[in-house]
């Protein structure tokens, strides 16, 4: 039979089908809730409500297939490196991992609750006591946190791993082997190779105003407080002053600077204002706070801070920590608005030397990072140093401005663990009650151990070149942490509540 409808523009264009009989296996409604095979704008909740149709979209479908291939690659690589895959419990106990727990009431044990694990932290440390020297799993983690574009509400997955007799360097080597290998396998972008750049936490906060810097952005924050020590500008007096120099920034018009000022004073950022000035091509200082840039200040900015002609400078003045944070947000916004980010690359670094403790909003000492980490200097540091000066063997992996993993050398000494928690306001009985398994296990000869947990959802999101984590999860929850497909969370019956010994309050 002659092919009369040949179409080389589609994959099936050279196939001619002549039907002699038709059997309908699954009927379909005449009108779909939305067009499946295009990326036209569709309300997200509608897509999620009919996610089984949404997943027929070629781009989304391929994202889920890509996720499967990435998971297999992780498993193959970890097996190659000698790790053993072990599953840990989902019904577990509450643990201070930095977020609210999801609680599960027990029917058999009235008035008691399980907690879904925020991470397999305690279990993987117990596995080190058990002699499984190299553990890993694709671990589900549950945290009651607010959703973001890069954070799925409720649940997420980690490539969780731990090693006995390991140092921080040993953990770095595993990450530097697994991450570039996986990213290079599934993308055409340039990927940083190990050893990755290592940036101390305090340096990161000084230079980037954030502990997850996007190194594709070339802008650096500088401290110019001393430069303006004798300035007549009242807004700078008694404040920490941060500066961001933008090469060629003088080419921008007044509207750009006004818009940046509006961004800085928005609720999202919280600055009281954003000072700026231009060093024009001819060397004159114009615009913004130019009248406060004396010849002496101008010379210092040029000689000590690398300000060239045709540059713009943005100044942030506030209390020290606020100035850092605001400057970090301004740096990110400038990089995006001016299109300064390096293209088609994955820039990777480790943030190291996190403080062991921080001040809470109430002014008390609290853990800054993972409470099960080993303090640098061990017991001596805990007994002799100001808690806010103690560093920990803790680190984060950062890729293109996203926190991709947290890890640490673990505290395997029960005496050091008790002391570390004591500084954060816990008594030894609190440690025994809340972390009794670890406390007891550590009495039986625990090897030094260390590990990390790269986030799978975020890595897949980056590799898939997506800006929304829900695009790489088969059945995600929406921006309000609701599953609009399965209609959860939902109201349960009075009998179900009775079964688990719960009575709802009216207030």
Image: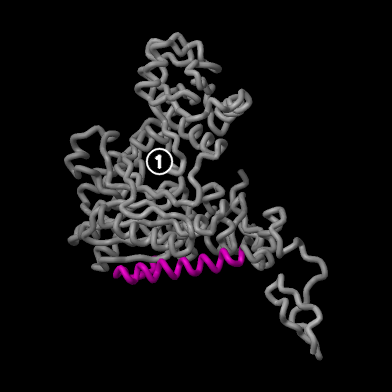
Residue matched to label 1: 211
Image label count: 1
When the figure is inspected, residue 417 is found, relative to residue 358, above or below; the finding is below
Residue extent of the magenta highlight: 60-88
The one nearer the camera, 200 or 422, is: 200
Question: Around disc 1, counting alpha carbons within 10 Å, would you say few (fewer than 14), some (14 to 19), or many (20 or more)?
Answer: many
Magenta includes 475? no
- Image coordinates for residue 149, horizontal then vertical, percent: 56, 49
Q: Residue pushed farthest front?
A: 282
Identify the residue at horizontal 61%, vertical 67% (top origin): 61
Image quadrant in which you'd find residue 440: bottom left
**Residue 455 seen from this side:** yes
Answer with left or right where residue 28 lies relative to residue 254. Answer: right
The stretch drawn in magenta includes residue 70 = yes
Along the line of sight, the residue nearer the viewer: 53 or 447? 53
Residue at image x 76%, y 62%?
33
Depth order, front residue of 387/5:
5
Please provide percent x and percent y for residue 44.
Answer: 67, 54
Residue 180 drawn at (x, y percent): 39, 59
Q: Quadrant of the C terminus?
A: top right
Secondary structure mainly formed by the magenta segment: helix
Please report the residue visible at 29 percent of the width from the left and 49 percent of the height from the top: 373
In the rendered structure, the answer to whether residue 315 lies left or right of residue 445 reads right
Q: Is residue 291 left or right of residue 488?
A: left
């Amino acid at each position: 039979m002659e092919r009369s409808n040949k179409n080389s523009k589609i994959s099936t264009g050279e196939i001619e089908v002549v039907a002699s009989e038709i059997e309908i296996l699954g009927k379909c409604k005449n009108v779909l809730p939305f067009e499946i095979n295009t990326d036209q704008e569709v309300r997200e909740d509608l897509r999620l409500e009919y996610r089984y149709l949404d997943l027929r979209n070629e781009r989304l479908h391929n994202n889920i297939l890509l996720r499967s291939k990435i998971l297999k690659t992780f498993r193959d690589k970890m097996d190659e490196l000698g790790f053993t895959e072990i599953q840990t419990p989902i019904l577990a106990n509450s643990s201070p991992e930095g977020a609210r727990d999801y609680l599960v009431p027990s029917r058999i044990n009235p008035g008691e609750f399980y907690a879904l694990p925020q991470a397999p932290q305690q279990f993987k440390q117990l596995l080190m006591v058990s002699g499984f020297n190299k553990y890993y799993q694709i671990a589900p983690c549950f945290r009651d946190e607010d959703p973001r574009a890069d954070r799925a509400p409720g649940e997420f997955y980690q490539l969780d791993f731990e090693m006995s007799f390991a140092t921080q360097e040993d953990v770095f080597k595993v990450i530097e082997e697994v991450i570039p290998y996986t990213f290079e396998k599934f993308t055409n972008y340039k990927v940083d190779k190990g050893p990755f750049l290592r940036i101390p936490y305090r340096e990161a906060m000084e230079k980037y105003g954030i502990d997850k810097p996007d190194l594709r952005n070339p802008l650096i924050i500088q401290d110019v407080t001393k430069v303006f020590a004798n300035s007549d500008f009242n807004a700078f007096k008694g404040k920490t002053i941060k500066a961001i120099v933008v090469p060629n920034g003088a080419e921008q018009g007044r509207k750009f600077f006004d818009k940046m000022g509006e961004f800085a004073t928005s609720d999202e950022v919280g600055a009281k204002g954003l000072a700026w000035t231009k060093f024009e091509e001819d060397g004159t200082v114009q615009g913004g706070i130019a009248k406060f840039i004396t010849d002496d200040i101008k010379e210092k900015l040029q000689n000590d801070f690398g300000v060239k002609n045709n540059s713009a400078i943005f100044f942030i003045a506030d209390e020290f920590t606020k100035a850092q944070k605001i400057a970090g947000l301004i740096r990110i916004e400038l990089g995006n608005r001016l299109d300064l980010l390096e293209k088609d690359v994955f820039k990777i670094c480790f943030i190291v030397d996190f403080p062991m403790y921080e001040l809470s909003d109430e002014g008390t000492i609290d853990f800054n990072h993972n409470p099960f980490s080993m303090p640098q200097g061990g017991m001596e540091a805990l007994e002799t140093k100001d808690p806010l000066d103690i560093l920990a063997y803790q680190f984060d992996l950062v890729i293109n401005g996203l926190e991709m993993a947290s890890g640490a050398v673990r505290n395997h000494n029960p005496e050091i663990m008790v002391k570390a928690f004591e500084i954060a306001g816990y008594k030894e009985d609190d440690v025994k009650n809340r972390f009794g398994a670890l406390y007891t296990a550590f009495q039986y000869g625990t090897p030094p151990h260390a590990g990390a947990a790269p986030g799978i959802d975020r890595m897949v999101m980056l590799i898939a070149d997506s800006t929304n984590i829900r695009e790489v999860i088969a059945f995600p929850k929406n921006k309000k942490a609701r599953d609009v497909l399965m209609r959860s969370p939902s109201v349960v019956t009075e009998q179900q509540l009775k079964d688990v010994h719960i009575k709802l309050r009216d207030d």
